Amino acid sequence: GQNIDQPTEMTATEGAIVQINCTYQTSGFNGLFWYQQHAGEAPTFLSYNVLDGLEEKGRFSSFLSRSKGYSYLLLKELQMKDSASYLCRTDKLIFGTGTRLQVFP
Amino acid sequence: GAGVSQSPSNKVTEKGKDVELRCDPISGHTALYWYRQSLGQGLEFLIYFQGNSAPDKSGLPSDRFSAERTGGSVSTLTIQRTQQEDSAVYLCASSLAGDRGLRLREKLFFGSGTQLSVL
C-alpha cells in the first residue's frame, strides 16, 4: 500500500514565500506530481518530479528526495489568487488529502 | 473536445435511487480515471481504465458502484441504491498514458465534476 501525508492548512501573507511539504511511503516509485485546486474547481497540474532535486517553473518550484520519501512545493511572491488547495500525488493513483493555503493581504 | 466533459454538472436524487454520471475524456486519451471528493476532503480514487486492459477497480467503495467505458472513450459511473454518504463531487480525469510503464507518469486532466446530492 501507500501513504501520503500533507499538512491540512497553511496561511501566508501576500508577497511572502511558503513551502508545502509532502511525505510518502510507496513501492515502485516513479515520480511525484503537484496539483492546484481552487475552491469549487477541478484540480490542475502544476509540476512533476521524477529525479531528486529542484524543478523551477516561474514562481513555483517543486523539490523531491526519493531516499527520504519527501517533496515540497515552494511558492514565491505569493498572490491572493494562490489561495487554493495543493495536492501531491505519487505516480500511483492516490492523492494526498491536500493542503489548503490561505493568502492574506 | 478541448477538455474533459462531465455531465450532469449537478445531480440531486433521493436515497435509494440509481444514478448515472457521464465522462467524455479528451480525444486521444487512452487512460480514464474516476475520483470523488467530499466537501473539504481530498481526492478518493475509485476506478481506472487503460485502453483495453481490465480496469483497476480497487478504489470502488462498495458493490453499489460500477463503471463502464464503451469503445475506449466515454465512461459511465453508476451508483445503485444511493445513500446519503454518496453525496460528493465525482471527478473524472483522462491522460495520454501509453504503455503501462509510462502510464503512471502522465499528468491528469480533470473535468469540472458532477456534484451529487443524495437527499
Image (tube, coloured by chain):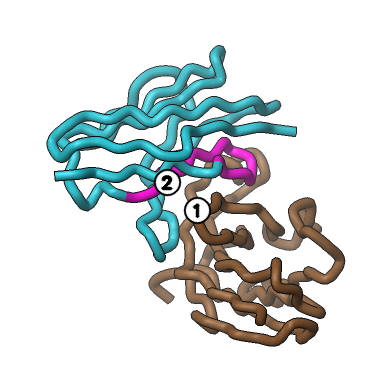
Chain colours: A cyan, B brown
Name which residue type carries label 2. Answer: Tyr
- Residue drawn at 40 percent across, 53 percent down: A37
Towards the viewer: A49 or A79? A79
Marks 1, 2 in one chain: no
Image quadrant in which the N terminus of chain B is located: bottom left
The quarter of the picture where residue B87 lies is bottom right
Q: Which residue is mark 2?
A: A35
Q: Which residue is mark 1?
A: B108
Mark 1 or 2: in front is 2
Q: Chain of mark 2?
A: A
Disc 2, SS = strand
Residue A95, disc? none
Q: Position of residue B94 (x, y in %)?
A: 54, 61
Give the extent of the magenta segment: A84-96
- Say above or below: A60 vs B11: above
Q: Provide residue A5's location: percent of width, then percent of height.
A: 56, 32
Q: Residues within 10 Å of mark 2 (few under 14, many from 20)?
A: many
Residues under numbered marks 1 and 2 in contact, where contact means CB atoms less than 8 Å apart? yes
Residue at the image point whose x is 60% and y is 45% from the top: B103
